[in-house]
Amino acid sequence: MQPRGFAPRIALPARWGRSSRTAGAPRFAAGRWRCTATAAPSRAEAATGFASLYDIALPALAEARLLTANGEARRVHALMSLIVGVGDTNLLYRGGTEGLAFAESHARAFLASGSVAIPDWRARAVAMHQAFTARRLSPGGCADLLAMALFVEARGA
């Protein structure tokens, strides 16, 4: 789902993919983590042309449009989909593998139990936020990808 005239998925790996994988010491928390089976740093995401943006975030926003007209609800649905699908290194950095698994399982349960299509979606999202906060978990990488998806979606509108 790429808007016309906007091709970072193709341009980024071709132009910057190699340097983003081989650049010097990282300056960000996510860069301290090597690519694993469950998480990849932001440089790896960029090297793929932001595959998670196009393969998870934008489809989740489109899927949410079928569930609700509420913009906030659409964003929550997309964020939960990203938490399940990305392996956010900020979650990994803050909570270790247990924190990452905790966040992913809660997001997966949110989606499986009806996501934003059921009346109490907001209360469940707030409860999840409180549980994350109590554990100092922040899905910052997923939030960044959501912001990018909203930009790309708006640009294509």
Image (spheres, rainbow, N blue to C red):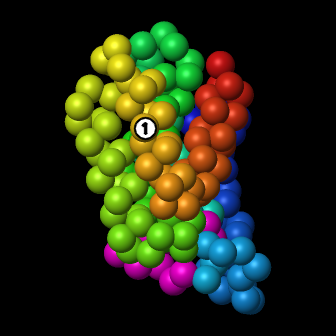
Image location of residue 99, percent across then percent down: 41, 66
Which residue of the protein is positioned furthest toward the front in this rendering?
134
Residue 17 colored in magenta in the image: no
Foreground residue among 119 and 141: 119
Q: Residue furthest top?
A: 69
> Looking at this view, is 101 or 17 the one in front?
101
Residue 89 visible in this rendered orientation of the protein: no
Query: Does residue 103 appear in the picture of this structure?
Result: yes
- Residue 72 percent coordinates (x, y): 56, 22
- Residue at the limit of the structure toward the left, as seen here: 112
Residue visible at 55% across and 61% down in the picture: 136
Front one among 123 and 30: 123
Height in image: 41 above or below 68? below
**Kind of residue at disc 1:** Ala
Q: Main secondary structure of the magenta part?
A: loop
* Residue 13 percent across, percent down from the top left: 62, 65
Q: Is residue 78 above or below residue 16?
A: above
Image height check: is 105 above or below 76? below
Spot occupied by residue 76 in the image (x, y as percentages of width and height): 49, 32
Quarter residue 7 falls in: top right
Q: Relative to the observer, which residue lies in front, 75 or 8?
A: 75
Residue drawn 42% across and 13% down? 68
Q: Residue furthest bottom?
A: 24
Residue drawn 48% across the image and 61% down it: 135
| Secondary structure category for the residue under label 1 | helix
Q: Quadrant of the C terminus?
A: top right
Question: In the rendered structure, which segment of residues is drawn in magenta?
Answer: 33-44
Q: Which residue is mark 1?
A: 127
**Residue displayed at 60% across by 47% down:** 143
